[in-house]
Image (cartoon, rainbow, N blue to C red):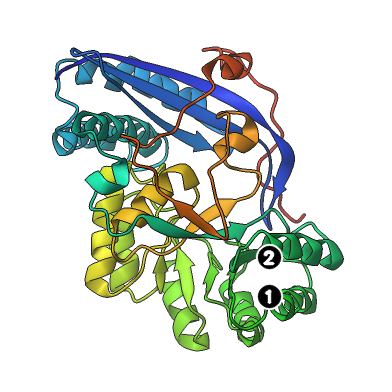
Amino acid sequence: MKITEVRCSGYRLPLKQPFTSSRVTMTHRELVLVEVNTSDGQSGTGWCTTAGVGAAAVEALITGYLAPMLTGMDPRNTEQVWQRLWMECHAAGPGGITTLALSAIDIAMWDLKAKAAGEPLYRLLGGARSTVEVYASAINLHLSKDDLLAQTRGQLEEGYRAFKLKVGRPGLDEDRERVMAVRKLIGPDCQLMLDANQKWSPGEAIQRSRLLLEAAPLFLEEPLLSDTIDGHAVLRAATGMPIAAGEQLCNRFEFWNYIRAGALDFLQPDVWKVGGITEFVKIAALGAAAGIPVSPHGAAELSVHLAAALPNAMHVENIFGLNLFDFGATSAPLPISGGKHQLSDAPGHGVRFEKDALQAHKLIPGSTVERKPLYHFSS
């Protein structure tokens, strides 16, 4: 089996509802789709998404530079392919656009490899379990307390037993009131996670964490800028708050710096940002060696396979409004029942894209798109 063709297209897809966190307002999601074809007529699909920034650059890097290197290689040799592309990408920077491009290609390789083996991706990766827990993660910082509770109540009725709540409202007491109201609603037996989206300064994070501990959160996600490794370690030691982070990190070396600093209780690699499945598995192994569980960030359609394959992986994040189905990329949502997903026996990752529907949102090389700033700052 040899690679004969690599196709790549970028798309800019409007969200049904803007995504608002403590620092970001997102109106679109950008998708880069890669299709790898082989000499024996098989094909594999990979992809990455961005927060509305950079898809055209990822597409250009793949089409103009990385794709030609793949011709003639065996896609089943995923480590060989990954190492070759990693070294090339590293010359342009060890993260960001480069690892997004590498991720999309790597995912396509694993899809091909699993199809060639006649196995679902999770089983090819190890098959630790066939059912995974899924938690409800929603766009809710902008909601009033009453609307937040109504949203959470609906998720409870759907069978979810773990929830993630955005924090970072201007007032400390307002954050605490909202968090405690949700805790009261879901009761002590459900898991509650908090996400600050890198909003706070170290001092503010310590102050707020001490108050929010009353709600017994499983973890506080991204309380500080991801660059401040020592700050996370200090916060963790000063408050006893379990800390999670990783969606901004781009490779196992960055995760290792966090681990050896004693800065995290939970690792949250994003398969689209770290260089794909090949690197994600290595990051999970670092966590296992350190006794730290992995909670995959986003990418639910792929994360269910990773969580099912890896022994130290936990639940999968279902971000309401930000899954592939939510912005029209696939024809059906990820099937979730009672807060769980049952993995299919279909070969590969099983994701099928609506390519005809996507054409209306295709990025045109060299064109410009009107954008509002992604980040909002206090004046």
**Which residue is pictured at 56% across the width and 12% down the height?**
364
Occupied quadrant, residue 172: bottom right
Q: Quadrant of the C terminus?
A: bottom right
Residue at which label 2 appears: 156
Q: Can you give x and y, in whole percent of width and height, for residue 47 in the image?
A: 42, 31
Decide which of 268, 97 is in the foreground and name it.
268
Occupied quadrant, residue 132: bottom left
Decide which of 21, 373 is in the foreground and name it.
21
**Which residue is pictured at 71% across the width and 52% down the height?**
377
**Which residue is pictured at 78% across the width and 56% down the height?**
142
Q: Can you give x and y, in whole percent of width and height, for residue 232 in the image?
A: 46, 73
Q: Can you give x and y, in whole percent of width and height, for residue 214 in the image?
A: 64, 87
Residue at which label 1 appears: 186
Residue 299 in view = no
Q: Can you give x and y, in whole percent of width and height, for residue 140 in the image?
A: 73, 57
Residue 192 in view = yes
The type of residue carrying mark 1 is Ile
- Please determine whether, in this image, residue 270 is positioned above or below residue 84: below
Q: Secondary structure at mark 1?
A: helix
- Please determine whether, in this image, residue 351 is positioned above or below residue 360: below
